[in-house]
Image (tube, helix red, strand yellow):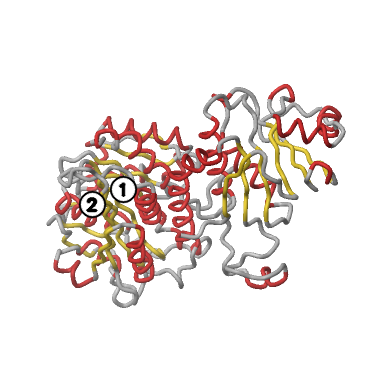
Amino acid sequence: MPLPIDVRFAPLTAPLQKLTAVLVGPDLQLGPVVRDIDKKTGGALLRAARSAEFTAKAKSSFELLGHEAAGVERLLVVGTGGRASDLDRAGLGGAIAGLLMSRNASSASLVVDLTEPFGNGAETVVADLAYGALLRAYRFTRYQTRKAEANGEAENGRTSRDLKELVIHCARPAEAEAEFAGRRAVAEGVVLARDLVNEPPNVLGPVEFADRIASLADHGLEVEILEPEQMAALSMNALLGVAQGSARPARLAILQWHGSRSKRAKPVCFVGKGVTFDTGGISIKPSPGMEDMKGDMGGAAAVVGAMVALAGRKAPVNAVGLVGLVENMPSGSAQRPGDIVTSMSGQTIEVLNTDAEGRLVLADVVWYAQERFKPRMIVDLATLTGAIMVALGKEHAGLFCNDDKLAAELIAAGEATGEKVWRMPMGAAYDKLIDSKTADMKNIGGRFGGAIIGAQFIGRFVKGVPWAHIDIAGTAMDSNRNDINQSWGSGWGVRLLDRLVRDSYEKAEK
C-alpha cells in the first residue's frame, strides 16, 4: 500500500541531504554529529541559538542557510523539550515533517544522535519519530491536477517539489528499522482509512468500497463480500431498508485475520458503519454541510484500516472486521417515516426518522457478528450522532459500553494513542425512550440524549458479549488538526483499535 513518503534509516556517518533537520536537547545539548556540524560552521549553530534565545522547547525551531562546509545547504534546528517521559515523540516527528515539507525539497535528512532526553531506548524513539513523520506527511491531492501540473510532474496529485523521502540517521539503523516495522503497518492502516473518508461520494459508493476491501486479500486477510440477495436471505431488513432508496446496492464486507496460534481462539470483533453518503433519506438533511456526509463511513474506514494494521504487523490474535455499506438516498423506493422493518434478530423497528439510519445498519451487522463468529468482544465505530459533538466537541469520541473491563481497556488505549474516548452513561431510564407502541422499538427517542439513545438502540442487538459503541461523529472527519494529522479525513480509530488489541488481547495469545 503506497505511503506518503519513503522513510529509511541510515548510520550517523552517512552523507546528509541538502535539507537536514537536527535535534537540540535541553540546555542546548548537542549530539556528536550536530556538534561536528556546529564546529564545521564555525560555531554558527550555537551562536544563532543563543542570539535567538532558543531554549530547545519541544517543537520550536530555527533555520540556518548556506553552510555547505557542513555538507548541508539548509539546516533546521528543532528542540526536543525536557524529560523523555514528557516527550510526545510521534508529535515531534510530525512537527519536523511539517517543517521539512514546507521547504519544497524532495528528500531530507533527520539526525537523531542525542542520548538525552531519549535515554537508552533510542531505537524506539527513532521509530516513533519516523511514525509521526509518516502520518503527518499524508495529503489527499489526487484530484488537484492543475496545481500538480503547475508545480512539476504530477503523480496522484503529488509534484516534484513534494517531500518524497526522509532519511533518518541514527546509531543503530537496522534495529530502528525493525522497531519501525509494526508502526509502518499501523500507518498503512491509517493512510487507507484517511483515503477512504476523503474520497468523493461519486467515486466511493458501497460497491466501490467493497471492491477496495476485496483487494486487501493481498495483505493476508480473508475477505468475503455479501450482496443484497444474500443479506435478504439472512433477513437483514434493517440494513437493506436504509439502502432501498439508492440506485447503488448495499454490501456487507467481512475481513478476517487468523493470527492466533490456536485455530479455536475466539476472535475480537470490530463493526463499522459504512454509509458512503447520507442525505438523510426522506427525512432529508439541510443543504449546508451535506457535502461532508461523504464521511459518514468513517467507522467502516477505521475498521478496515485496523484490520490492515493487524495483518501488516502479524498480530498474534484472531480478529474479524465487518462493515455494512449502504447509501441513504431519497427516491420513490426509499424507506418512509413510519415504516416497520423486521431485523435479522427478529425484533421489529418502527422507523420514525430515516436520518437515524446508521443504527439500523449496525443492528443487523452486530447481530450477524455474534451469530456467526461468537466473538470475545465487539467494538463498533460509527459517525452516529451530531449530539455527541454537542456533548464532547471534537476532542473525544463518545464511549458507550456494557462491560467495565472493556471500557477501561479502550480508555487506556485512547490515552496511549491520543485517540481519546469519554465514557457516557447508559441505562434502563434511557432505554425505555425507544419503546414503540406499534413495534418492539423505534429508531429515535426524542430531542434529549441523542447519542445515548443511539447507543441504547444498538445495545438491544447485543446478547451477552462484552460490547462497546464508539460514536466518532466529532473525530472521524474535519476534527482538530494536530502534529500527526492535517487531513480532513483523520483515520481516527485505527490506532485506537490496534493499541487495544496489542495491549489487552495479544498477551493472552502468547
Position of residue 442 measured from the top left corner of the image (x, y, whole percent): 23, 53
Amino acid type, residue under disc 2 in the picture: Val
Instruction: Find residue 173 and name its label.
Output: none
Q: Residue at x 62, y 41 (%)?
A: 11
In-front residue for pair 278/179: 179
Q: Residue at x 22, y 38 (%)?
A: 466
At numbered mark 1, what does the secondary structure look like: helix, strand or loop? Answer: strand
Q: Is residue 217 above or below residue 207?
A: above
In which quadrant of the rendered view does residue 416 lie?
Answer: top left
| 286 left or right of 77 in image | left
Amino acid type, residue under disc 1 in the picture: Asp
Q: Is residue 496 above or below residue 274?
A: above
Residue beneath disc 1: 380
In the rendered image, the residue lying farthest to the left is: 346
| 216 left or right of 131 in image | left
Q: Residue at x 45, y 68 (%)?
A: 201
In which quadrant of the rendered view does residue 246 lie?
Answer: bottom left
> Label 1, label 2: how many angstroms apart (C-alpha)?
8 Å
Tags 1 and 2 touching, CB below 8 Å: yes
Residue beneath disc 2: 366
